[in-house]
Image (cartoon, rainbow, N blue to C red):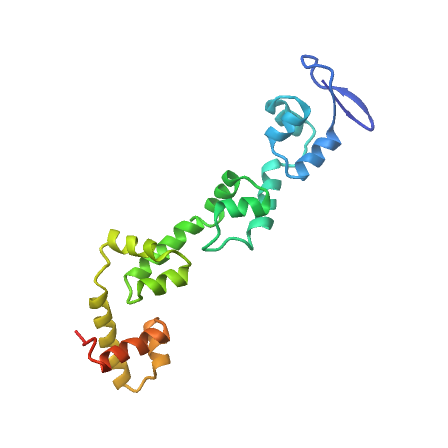
Amino acid sequence: MYIYEKTGTNQYNLNFCANKISITKIKQDIEGGKTISEIAKLYNISERSVYNIIKQFNLPNIKEIINQKLNDALSDKINETASLKALSEQTGFSIYAIKKWIKEHIGMLPKIEKRKKILEAIHSTKLNREIAEEYNVPINTVKSLRYEHNAGNIKKKKQECLNKILILQKNGLSGRKIAKKLNINNSTVYRLLKQYRNNELMPD
């Protein structure tokens, strides 16, 4: 195998067949985001040979380039509802590469972070429907998690919340301020107060 530049031809390793490989092209492949495996297949050489070429000719670090491209591609796309499959289709990177990047830079996969927030929500006074809508998941998913984590006593939680609402209301706070103080939706405050007025829910 021969490695050549415009300046001439350099014999690299006589144990290989006499292929001619341009260092410039390999450099372009690296900068274009190709992996060691892809470059090896492209030039019909071993991955070890690719590593040796990179080291001998001081070519760019593939891992650093790929990581930078992942940074550019994923930084604005990672959110609680992002799926690995969708991210892979949008960016062109493999699910494995994206998963590894997320673990290194975020520490938790979006779906895991989303599940964590849903678990926090089911221990609040929010209804299953509210949680499902807020996190864009099927209501049966919320019900299953509630059952799995023994967070099913909604009436008790509503009563506890109503107690706090009534106390704050007596202190002169508006519905909006009560919602903000208790970190719940305005609609939750008004709904519980309405149930209280209709004798459908009594404080604990």
In depth, the one of 12 and 28 nearer the eye is 28
Image position, residue 148 (x, y; %):
25, 51
Q: Is 41 on the left-hand or right-hand side of 88?
A: right
Q: Quadrant of residue 155?
A: bottom left
In depth, the one of 13 and 192 nearer the eye is 192
Q: Is residue 75 above or below residue 65?
A: below
Q: Quadrant of the N terminus?
A: top right
Q: Quadrant of the C terminus?
A: bottom left
Image position, residue 33 (x, y; %):
64, 39
In depth, the one of 184 and 63 nearer the eye is 184
Q: Quadrant of residue 138?
A: bottom left
Tell me the residue at 28%/67% (across/down): 125
Tell me the residue at 25%/86% (across/down): 170
Q: Quadrant of residue 195?
A: bottom left
Q: Residue furthest top?
A: 15
Image position, residue 154 (x, y; %):
23, 65
Tell me the residue at 40%/63% (across/down): 134
Image position, residue 48 (x, y; %):
60, 23
